[in-house]
Amino acid sequence: MTESNKNTIIKDFRSMSFYQIWIRSFADGNGDGIGDLIGVYDKLDYIKELGVDGIWFSPLYPSPNADFGYDISDYYDIHPDYGNLDLFKKVLKGAHERGLKVLMDLVVNHTSDEHKWFLESKKSRDNAYSDYYIWKDPKIVKGKKCPPNNWDSLFEGKAWEYVPERDQYYLHIFARKQPDLNMDNPVVRQEVKKIMRFWLSMGVDGFREDVITFISKHPDLPDGNPFIPIANGMPFYKDGPKIQEYLREFRDVCLEYGALQIGEAPMTTVETALLYITGKERTLDMMFHFDHMMADCFLTEYIQRDFNLVKLKSAFSKWQTRLLGKGWNALYLENHDHPRIISRYGDEKNFWRESGTALAACYLFQQGTPFIYQGQEIGMTNISLSSIDKYIDVSSKNNYNNFHTNWPKAKRLKRIRDSSRDSSRTPMQWNSNKYAGFSSVKPWFYINHNYKTVNVEAEEKDPDSILNFYKKCLAIRKENKGLIYGRYFEHFHFSKKLYVYTRRYKNERYLIIISFSGNDEKIKVPKGYDLNDMELLISNYKDTDSIDFYANLRPYEVRVFKNK
């Protein structure tokens, strides 16, 4: 650990923004069709010029890729598809030289079933690794061996898999090839702390901690409610009895290095989040929750509903107001686990640019630390594939093969198109050349057909592009402390067409007006605000002087004002 690395990010993260890299689809630097660290190194200047302050890497570790990196087989190395440790150190050094922090993904709820710990653990009940995972004897029902309880896996089938060598079942909350670690075993926790110190000592600045609120299970592992589809059992492994005790151990390691910790927490309420991210004794600095990702679905993107702006605003405002002065928000609209946001909450057919910029403004000016996922900044959209066999994501295949099987194929495929994680994992669209500039050879996965118009090169040349709008928003945020620290107020909550909120900080006052309509809408200004006394910081339409500025908003128009 170097002194320059210590105690920096933990102090400054509130004013930062981050760029998430899902490396397999970011940039292919060695010409094998797979994104890699050479590609990342070549794009560090692009990331810096975007205006962010750091990078969050999705898993880079060796993995059989049953869940594309979230099934780790070795925590101390780099997947050979992506490079090696020397190349990672080169990227880390290059990022730091540009003033960019680097966060790694810490995945310790589970490993791959090909990790050496599991390979040893499944051999017998009495070896050094036998208690590294959650093993239970079968339940005997009418003379037959059955799983220990009725829990469902979030990815495929039931949450238990039988292993003859031990005559026991192991727990897997996610895919069968992702056995859950037994965090109640103190030796396992020591292994986690060893992993953290390995990367922090190398110079990594912190971690995004995958489904970290799942690591403490109820000791009795009781049956769940079978009427809760997929999530059956979740009350007994989410926010478990010893979760804070275990996170405190991991927190102590990060505090040694001044490192940042962001926890991913599915199905988490504000009240629960505050138990993790409040005050000096917090066990996490920020939390990725899912509330605002439910504005067009129920519990999961696969159970789809019409987009509801009021529902989106409710989620945003709830977290903004209840965390105020207590915790800090992690702001995001896209990541590797969700379909593209313009395809969900915007209008990719009629108002692609306008809705893409409106969505950017709706979250970048809230209180919190923004995260931008690769391709989001150029308005990438969902991919539509002609067969389920072309999809790779394990959860998408499970959903297609097990739900709504009586529907016509076209209808089932559309549901997958609108919900699949694969839509966020198509290769990054750098230019209009063959393979979108991602690679010189055929990529590992399909490229979206719109790459000839939706790409970095074209948008860098267009001052009104989605890419340049993101750059401007991030610059404005850096230049105005009130847009970082100011108090948030929502207005006209029940409007189904407009999202209007204000920020106040000392003598600074900001007004953010965003239309979510495909038609012209009458502008609404909160009481106490006079547009004649405010300056326009940014709009996503360039000809603001040629319209009745105080009367109407055009489709998906954004206007951000600051008091003079």
Image: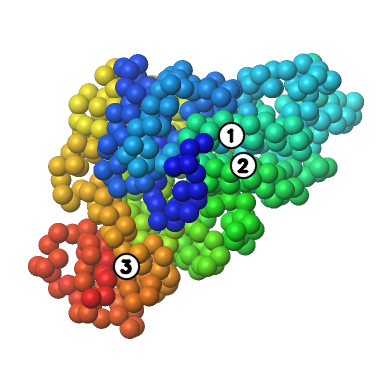
Mark drawn on residue 197: 1
Q: CA distance from mark 3 to mark 1?
A: 42 Å
Left or right, 539 with respect to 274, comes to left
Of all residues, the one furthest to the front in this rendering is 3
- Disc 1 vs disc 2: Cβ atoms closer than 8 Å? yes
Q: Position of residue 183 (x, y in %)?
A: 72, 37
Mark drawn on residue 354: none
The kind of residue tagged 3 is: Ile
Answer yes or no: is residue 416 visible.
no
Left or right, 295 with respect to 45, comes to right
Of all residues, the one furthest to the left in this rendering is 546
Q: Circle 2 sits on which residue?
A: 253
Closer to the eye: label 3 or 1: 1
Q: Circle 3 sits on which residue?
A: 512
The kind of residue tagged 2 is: Val
Going from N to C along the chain, the mark reached first, 1 or 2, is 1
| Residue located 61% across and 55% down the image | 282
Of all residues, the one furthest to the right in this rendering is 143
